[in-house]
Amino acid sequence: TVTPTTTTAATTAKGTSTRESNSSSYASNGTPAAAAISPASDTVAAATATSSTTTQSNSSYFTAVTHQQLVPTSTNTIETPDTKVILKEILNSKSTVYILLASMVRFMAGFTIAAWKAPLFLDLFPDQALSFSVDNALIIAMAGSASTLLGGMAADKLAAAAAASPTPSPRLDVQRNYTKSSYDVSSSSSSFSSFPASLNAAQSRLLVPIVGTLLAAPLWALTVYANNFNSASSALLLEYLVAECWFGPAQAALYAALPNPNLRASTQGVFSLLTAIGNLAPVAVGALISTSGLWGFSANTPIRDALLWTVTPAYVLSAALFALAAAELGDTEKDFQKS
């Protein structure tokens, strides 16, 4: 009875010793016992650690890229252009300068008429104050608006006709992709197919303010020296109808004359500034008809003479400056690129 028990105890002790020996053997080989018993768990842990490392790496990458996109480096800073540099570039073009000067003189003539036509009519026809008020409102609303609209439409038609007709400038030939030897003028669909070949689109637009301003000069002289109210009012109507066509075509030609299309906004600012300079002309007329005169010169000038010898020459000078601008635009290709 005692012997089997002893044998069982000995066997159990031997098994325990064997497991301890195996554990010691694994430990001495540098491999943990838990790793030897559960190798799969070690693989899962390693994969988890690798995934975590990859996620952290990707997160760091995207954070760096996002930071690089949102925060510009100091080498990519945007510099604000200098005002003097912009003005120098705008005024570097002769055609641009001529158009700006022509517009300034034209503003002087227009603002002088707007400020002094009522005193002129009251001085010439004092008993027609009510009739002048009605006629003046209708002339501005109807003749002035019609002139502005028709002037722009005429300038666009002339520009389209010029673009469809041959031109002697080789530079323009390249831009318009044809040769003079193979181009047939009769094939043009434009109603202005016989348009003078020496004019390009920008020049043709300037024909409108040139002709309109020249026609306005004698009509204003007729207005000032009319013998009766009806004649003066009719001449003023015709003067508005031909004079106010200049604004749109002049601006279109101004943009075509610019050396850099990115300067359009700055050039528009300069163009608007000219209105302030143009308002000095009515002040000068007021000085001429005053008792003190303009810097002591020509005091007590009759209002009729003051308006005749200031507005009429201004019209002629403005037309001449527009013509000079058109001459300078004879060898440009910007108008065809923008048409």
Image (tube, rainbow, N blue to C red):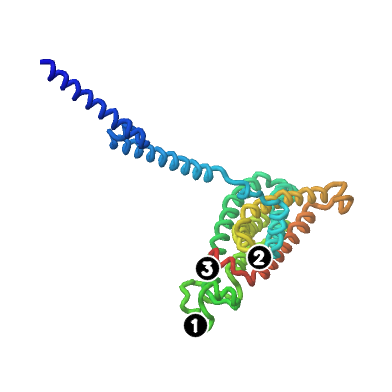
SS for tag 1? loop
- Labels 1 and 3: the sequence-earlier one: 3
Count of numbered circles on the image: 3
In the rendering, at what x and y percent does residue 209 appear? 64, 62
In the rendering, at what x and y percent does residue 201 appear? 57, 68
Residue behind mark 2: 210
Q: Which mark is residue 147?
A: none
The quadrant in which residue 167 appears is bottom right
In the rendering, at what x and y percent does residue 282 appear? 75, 49
Q: CA distance from mark 1 to mark 2?
A: 33 Å
Residue behind mark 3: 160
Question: Which-is-in-front pick, marks 1 and 3?
Answer: 1
Q: CA distance from mark 1 to mark 3?
A: 20 Å
Q: CA distance from mark 3 to mark 2?
A: 18 Å
Q: Quadrant of the N terminus?
A: top left
Q: Left or right of 23: which side holds 8?
A: left
Q: Left or right of 256: which side holds 296?
A: right
Q: Which mark is residue 182?
A: 1
**From what the image shows, is residue 35 above or below residue 235?**
above
Give the amino acid at mark 1: Ser
Residue found 57% across the figure and 64% down from its top:
155
